[in-house]
Image (cartoon, rainbow, N blue to C red):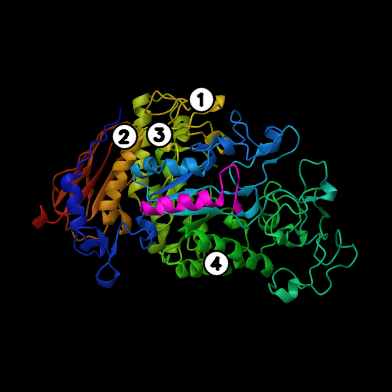
Amino acid sequence: MMKTKISLAAGLALSVSLLSGCGQAEAQDTPVYGTGETAVALDDVRTRLPEDEVIYFVLPDRFENGDPQNDAAGIEGGRLKSGYDPTHKGFYHGGDLKGLTEKLDYIQGLGVTAIWFAPIFKNKPVQGTPGNESAGYHGYWVTDFTQVDPHFGTNDEFRAFVDAAHARGMKVYMDIIANHTADVLYPKECEGQKECTYRSKADYPYLRKGGVEGAVINEGFAGDTVMTAENFAKLTDPAYAYTPVTPAGEENIKVPAWLNDPIWYHNRGDTTFEGESSRYGDFVGLDDLMTENPRVIDGFIAIFGNWIDKYGIDGFRIDTAKHVNPEFWTRFTPAMMERAKAKGIPNFHIFGEVYAHEVDPGFLAQFTKRDELPTVLDFAFQVAAHDMLTGKAGTHLFGKLIDGDVLYAGGEATARQLPTFLGNHDMGRIAHMLDKAYPDASEEERLARISLAHVLLMTTRGVPTIYSGDEQGFVGDGGDQAAREDMFPSQVASYNDNRLIGTDATTAVANFDDQHPLYRLIAQLSEIRKQTPQLRYGRTKLRASNEKPGLLAFTRGDDNGTETFVMLNMTNQPINQNVEVGINSISFLTLIEQCPAAVSAPGSVSINLPPLGYAICQAAPQDKK
């Protein structure tokens, strides 16, 4: 088992008092950040900054079943009607808001301060061609944006959950979608086909019916780049590319009612995720909204603003943000921030999903500048962490990540608010990625490697985000459905045969073990992060790296003798070497594992790390020794 000893008594007390390096006030009875009129108690849920949080992401359906009466949502007719089949990984399993509320003790014990959950809006229960059906358990097939899906409970139960979280000082982040709705509309010309080929604006312009040689329609429409109500009032016929059809009985399935009119959708067929189709095509068949239209923008401002007004939530994660035109976000985001401030929520956290496959901060940064999204999920961190931890790349990759922080709107201050993560419900779990890279690893090595990953996550700039189940050693078999295991006893065979990390348990039993070594490690790291301002606000300086897998060392904070020093050994070999630190750092206190007591010479410290070892050290100037 990986050793996770922590020396908190002296180390954390010092890290709270040595605040001058981060512009901090002296420690008081309650830890604070800021000075004078800006001093804010860390336990104040409304005024904490985004970088003060540790986020826990959860799929409500897969977490805890608090009310078995809502498992089928009152829908009769079997799984292809209700979507409920706890034995199938692609259907509802029974988790709900009541269960999530009942397990807040468990979540809070992990050191989590903010809960982000997959969408809880009412979904189309089942979609897919015959033989390929699956359910909307994940929440991304919305039909009613005003109601909680009955599989998860009621709006009142959602209110109870938010109130219970807030009572504990925990924030609540909703997952929202503006790119698409459930798959209700279908192109008449594609009926019976598995796919519907995307039809471009060049080949199927808005002013012709069914192609460039078709009949004249939508006269006077100046195109979708003229985003005025007057212009879009001239777009009256949606059959420019395909003829959109609504299935019998589903003409009024969407709420608010305006969403049922095909004119508010692009109706151009399936996206290829490239070029024009990335913004105009249906995302795996889901009805792609015409987000250029001011009516659509106003509609979603009203929809999601209402959730802020009614329930006082603390932030939004925005699904498929990069598939929506930038102008939508430049109007939507400030409107949401204004609604939040009016509700007394000054630090409403908005982060967009911008899927990326490379360590390319510039790609992500464009969405904070052109689209004016406050922050985005840090996929660049995920790729860097994956490649370093699996041995695909050297630890110098960390430098490329950090060097890109200046590219974000707001620069390094914005980078500190990017949610960071190791894996997720789409791409899969970091444990599965590590098992693929090291298939012959012993159980001890598996635990050591996943522990190292979480130390990296919890000490780098950004807002660490834990995917539920990671703290229980969940591994999964890949991405999407294969990475969405139940926390309560599962009936899915392909989940229950997985070899979890750090435990002899399987997913066939409940996994809420607060003594699991990963749970305990994350809880320790969360406490260190909470009590160490440098880990939340400090600048990152790369101190040691290599073009091959090896040592990664960095400091957080300014060079005034109070920096926090982090070192990680990405190899199976011990590392002994000198590493540069700030010239004013004199001695070190151990926050976790084992740190050198003092520098070897001004600006240099000798480190000694075991295979796959790590340490977090708090520097102290000479008079604080």
The residue wearing badge 3 is 512
Q: Earlier in the sequence, mark 3 or mark 4?
A: 4
Q: Are marks 2 and 4 in contact (CB under 8 Å)?
A: no
Residue 549 drawn above or below residue 45? above
Q: Are marks 3 and 1 in contact (CB under 8 Å)?
A: no
Residue type at mark 4 is Arg
Residue type at mark 2 is Leu
Residue type at mark 3 is Phe
Residue pushed farthest bottom?
230
Residue 261 drawn above or below residue 77? below
Place of residue 136 in the rendered image (x, y in percent of width and height, measured from the top left):
63, 42
Disc 2/disc 1 C-alpha distance (Å): 29 Å
Q: Is residue 391 visible?
A: no
Q: Earlier in the sequence, mark 2 or mark 3?
A: 3
Q: Are marks 3 and 4 in contact (CB under 8 Å)?
A: no
Q: Residues within 10 Å of mark 4 (few under 14, many from 20)?
A: few
The residue wearing badge 2 is 612
Place of residue 374 in the rendered image (x, y in percent of width and height, measured from the top left):
48, 63
Which mark is in front, 2 or 1? 1
Disc 2/disc 3 C-alpha distance (Å): 27 Å
Q: Nearer the viewer, residue 477 or 70?
A: 70
The kind of secondary structure element at disc 4 is loop
The residue wearing badge 1 is 496
Q: What stretch of residues is rendered in magenta?
A: 147-169
